[in-house]
Image (spheres, helix red, strand yellow):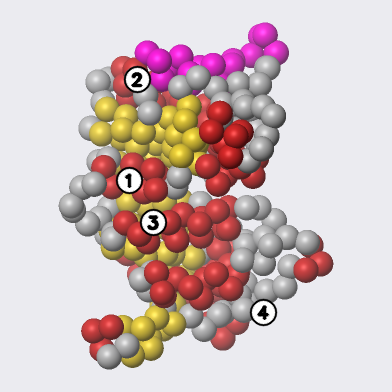
Amino acid sequence: MKFSIQVNEGPYQHQATDSAYQFTKAALEKGHEIFRVFFYHDGVNNGTKLTTPPQDDRNIVNRWSELAEKHDLDMVVCVAAAQRRGIVDEGEMQRNGKDAENIAPGFRISGLGQLIEAAVQADRLVVFGD
Amino acid sequence: MSEDIKKFMYVNRRAPHGTIYAWESLEVVLIGAAFDQDVSVAFFDDGVYQLLKNQDTSDIETKNFSPTYAALGDYDVTKLYVEQESLEERGLTIDDLMDLKWEDEDEDWAEKDSIRVVSRAELSSVLDQQDVIFSF
């Protein structure tokens, strides 16, 4: 089956992001296709490489990046939600006159149309949040 | 893009202020309107407060985005389901909500109500008919 995943909550604050990761990983391991993982609301905070959790805890951001690299996952951070919360890639840095970027490997910033397209293209959209 | 049209429903269960979910949900509905899907929006639980008229956020210094709901009709988002029980549980009636309209081009642009108050059971069956449910 072809899934799209929507993540509505931030890492560490809420289990939704862990559940989304576990679901995505399990689906891929079972041979399903993940069309896209879309990060919205505070979910965009899954995409900052500046995250530094204690060493004895899971690294949620790196975990996504590794999964993306292994499975060629498309992980999209909503641009409007990202701009509000300070998630910045090279393009956004230049466009908005910032002096830094913080997007983690495997993530890309794009528009909400990517979420709609993900829902259109997939057999199932699975939303993780409250 | 795929040619087929899906039934999309955006589900709103939270109060308009206090968290950003309602506002960012509305942004998705507006963007999604460009994709020519069969779109409807549901409001239940505290989500019914999103459609209250005369919202004023000046004292909490947040954006009052409630006037944007009136634009939904122009985006061909014309089916706004509001759950009767959620209204009643909060002491609200449809008269407390914004008078949202859309113009039906098939009927000489007749103005029609966008809000449909439905029972919990009816809403349940509408949810059941959807291909995609966006939950905020």
Magenta residues span A54-70
The answer to whether mark 3 and mark 1 are in CB contact below 8 A is no
Number of residue marks? 4
Between disc 2 and disc 1, whose residue precedes? Answer: 2
Question: Residue beneath label 1, please?
Answer: A117
Q: Which amino acid type corresponds to the residue marked 1 in the rendered image?
A: Glu
* Element under disc 4: loop
* Element under disc 3: helix
- The quadrant holding residue A29 is top left
The residue lying at 32 percent from left, 88 percent from top is B109
Q: Are marks 3 and 4 on the same chain?
A: yes
Question: Residue beneath label 2, please?
Answer: A72
Q: Which amino acid type corresponds to the residue marked 4 in the rendered image?
A: Asn
From the top left corner, tell me how far across and down residue B27 is, in percent.
Answer: 50, 57
Mark 3–mark 1 Cα distance, whole angstroms, equals 9 Å
Question: Residue beneath label 4, please?
Answer: B54
Question: Residue beneath label 3, please?
Answer: B32
The residue lying at 27 percent from left, 91 percent from top is B108
Q: Are marks 2 and 3 on the same chain?
A: no
| Other residues around mark 4 within 10 Å, as few (<14) / some (14–19) / many (≥20) | few
Question: Is residue A103 shown left or right of residue A67?
Answer: right
Q: Which amino acid type corresponds to the residue marked 3 in the rendered image?
A: Gly
- The quadrant holding residue B46 is bottom right
The residue lying at 48 percent from left, 27 percent from top is A107
Between disc 3 and disc 4, whose residue precedes? Answer: 3
